């Protein structure tokens, strides 16, 4: 954050864990758990210092209460009915407009996971609430995603799947907003074929030039050394 404090998570989406803060103190670092529960890996922070994360069924916000503590607020609960996303894989990310994006490992039209977008409604019947939009429902050929996503300044969403329609060893995809519509167009940027790595399981990152970086669980030729 602006003060140089670090934030992260322990545990996974279903096991006991916490959101922690590391702050510098006396030449070292002091650890404090600021939220406890089954938190998914990774959190993100907005310009106001609010923290956003996910559990196996919710997306939440942590806001500082001014007394050294944090107030948790559930922004969205994933329903259990068919076609909606369920079981987030990591914490969400923010775009410049304050929308939240993430992936789920199940749910969607074929129950193989989704990419979702949460937006704060300022008008209509859901004014004052967070609304979900499913950007894509993955098919069986893609396998269930286990990573998070990244969003650039233009609103394009990038992510990975451990399988995929290209070669079956994982894909890197981009989803771009269609001008004048609420829809997104999906494009496969790269399909791993085994000789260049297999099964991208981590979230990609993007530099200022727009280049994407990531890792695979298996390296070239299928060796369990990664790439």
Image (spheres, rainbow, N blue to C red):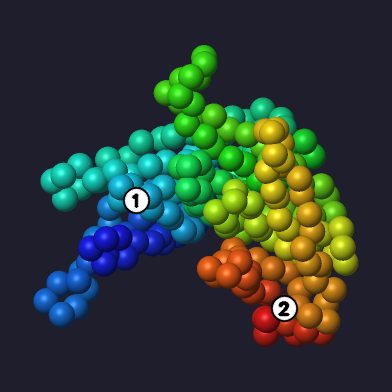
101 above or below 211? above
Instruction: Looking at the picture, tell me which residue is in the foreground, 205 or 178.
Output: 178
- The residue that label 1 is drawn on is 47
* Residue 114 visible in the picture: no
Under circle 1, the secondary element is: loop
* Residue 115 visible in the picture: yes
Q: CA distance from mark 2 to mark 1?
A: 37 Å
- Residue at the extreme top: 125
Q: Position of residue 48 (x, y in %)?
A: 30, 47
Quadrant (top left/top right/bottom left/bottom right) for the N terminus: bottom left
Under circle 2, the secondary element is: loop
Callout 2 touching callout 1 (CB < 8 Å): no
- The residue that label 2 is drawn on is 218
- Mark 1 is surrounded, within 10 Å at the Cα level, by few (under 14), some (14 to 19) or many (20 or more) other residues, namely few
87 above or below 141? above
- Residue 224 falls left or right of residue 148: right
Q: Earlier in the sequence, mark 2 or mark 1?
A: 1
């Amino acid at each position: 954050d602006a003060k140089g404090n670090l934030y992260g998570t322990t545990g996974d989406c279903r096991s006991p864990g916490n959101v922690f803060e590391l702050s510098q103190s006396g030449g070292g670092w002091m650890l404090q758990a600021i939220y406890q529960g089954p938190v998914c890996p990774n959190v993100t922070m907005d310009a106001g210092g609010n923290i956003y994360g996910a559990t196996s069924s919710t997306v939440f916000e942590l806001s500082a209460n001014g007394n050294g503590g944090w107030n948790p607020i559930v922004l969205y609960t994933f329903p259990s009915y068919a076609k909606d996303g369920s079981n987030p894989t990591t914490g969400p990310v923010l775009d410049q407009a304050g929308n939240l994006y993430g992936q789920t490992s199940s749910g969607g039209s074929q129950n193989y996971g989704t990419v979702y977008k949460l937006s704060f409604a300022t008008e209509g019947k859901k004014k004052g609430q967070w609304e979900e939009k499913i950007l894509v429902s993955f098919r069986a050929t893609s396998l269930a995603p286990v990573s998070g996503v990244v969003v650039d300044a233009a609103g394009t969403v990038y992510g990975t799947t451990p399988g995929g329609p290209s070669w079956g060893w994982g894909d890197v995809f981009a989803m771009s907003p269609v001008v004048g519509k609420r829809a997104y167009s999906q494009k496969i940027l790269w399909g791993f074929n085994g000789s260049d790595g297999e099964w991208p399981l981590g979230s990609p990152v993007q530099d200022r030039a727009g280049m994407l970086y990531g890792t695979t669980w298996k390296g070239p030729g299928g060796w369990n050394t990664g790439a």
